[in-house]
Amino acid sequence: MKRSVLIITLTSVFLFLASLGMIAYTLGWIAPLDIITTNHVVVGDLDYTLSGSFITDETIIVPGTELIDTPFAVDNDSSISSMLRMQVTYTAYAYVGEVLTPSTVIYRGGSTEALYVGFASGFVCPEGEDYWYMTDLAHVFSANSGPQDLILSLYYDGDNTTIDFQGQDVTVKLTIQVSQADHVSWTTLADYDFATGYPNP
Amino acid sequence: MIKKKMTMSLVALIGASLMFIVATFAWLTVSEYVNSGITVVNVSNADTTATLQMAEVAEGPYTTVTSLIIPSSVPGDVFYYRLAIENTGEVALLTSVYFRGFTDAVGRAGGDPTNFNNGQTLRDILIVDSYYTNDSVNVPAVTGQTFNALIGSLPMGIGYDQAVFGIAANIPLAAAETEYVYFSLTVSDEAGTDYENLRLAISQIQISSVSS
């Protein structure tokens, strides 16, 4: 008995709602929906493959010794356009008073710098900047731009390296940073270090 | 006894529904107007067509696309769209546009999934601006709000895959008239690398209308 009442009640409710829907549709209270499907938004990512290396740490070097074993390069497979910059720092020695003092210097390509860096064609260090950019500050690498040479050669320049460097420890550091757009802060892609020293007696 | 009464009620309801349908669809008349004996019911035809269009700049030109697809973007990018909504029916309508159903995913399958795994979502950095035209007058609708701000709090048991928000509501649309809903999606220029390689699917852009 209760089951029959339930069935009849549910049927009545269904019929009532169906009638209401029919009335609404018929009188134009409700128009059919227009639906646009399969929509999506993607924020791209950076995909750089690095290659290159310094010679083995602790190698004893002299001015003119090539410190790069394999030239540094990247292969850009990023799905978006991006920017890239590099910084090279190195140890330099100079007397402060009578004390030989080491300092970490940012390489900017000056003619009197103790280090020589052979950047790939097109890289420049704009006035007042600490980083090397392709062409200028605003240069953008397009998506999937492919292989890009960075540094081909790097050594202490005998013309500018004095006897003061003899027997001293030196460190050279290469930092590569990338950014997906002007609006995003730079992210360090890689740090390469080379350190050596003349063994103490 | 009760069963008998309810059965009778049910029969009466079915009969009434049937009579209404027969009368409304004019199965028994050739007139556009159906005289039910009590009131005159105007049988109306309400329908719309909507076309999605996109442009590189807000001023256009706009070209028709089948769906909203932004395959690769970076912070600061702005994407311009508009919906051309035509009232192809015979009655004036009020039309609303909704975004419905949001699903997060990794942007590129071979890319770094860290941001997705950390729960980052583009709903936080996608910003909506919209307005619609009404008799050639631009009416602002949404100004600079993220998807999440527009979605607001979700009811219990409802996920973002069922969430919905409107970008324009109750746009007057006279019969045989076309109005436009302009909207832009901006990838916030404050987004950092923690939003790289993310994807947000929007299952539906829904244009619904009711008789005004």
Image: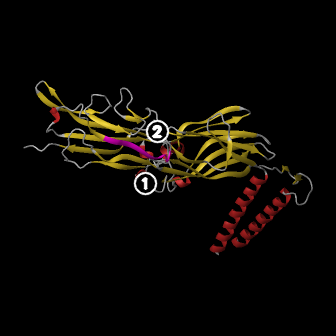
Q: Does A179 sit left or right of B15 as displayed?
A: left
- Residue A15, numbered label: none
Q: Is residue A47 above or below residue A108?
A: below
Q: Chain of mark 2?
A: A
Picture quarter with the N terminus of chain B = bottom right
Q: Position of residue B186 (x, y in %)?
A: 54, 39
Q: Which residues are magenta?
A: A143-153
Q: Residues within 10 Å of mark 1 (few under 14, many from 20)?
A: some
Picture quarter with the C terminus of chain B = top right
Of circles 2 and 1, the one toward us is 2
Q: Chain of mark 1?
A: B
Q: Does A151 sit left or right of A162 as displayed?
A: right
User: Circle 2 sits on which residue?
Assistant: A181
Q: Residues within 10 Å of mark 2 (few under 14, many from 20)?
A: many
Q: Residue furthest bottom?
A: A1
User: Circle 1 sits on which residue?
Assistant: B113
Q: Are marks 2 and 1 on the same chain?
A: no
Q: Position of residue A20 (x, y in %)?
A: 73, 56
Secondary structure type for disc 2:
loop
Residue at the location (73% across, 50% down)?
A31
State how the image is colored: secondary structure
Count the numbered circles shown: 2
Amino acid of disc 2 = Ala
Amino acid of disc 1 = Pro
Q: Is residue B85 above or below residue B159?
A: above
Residues at marks 2 and 1, CA–CA distance in whole angstroms: 20 Å
* Residue A131 sits in quarter: top left
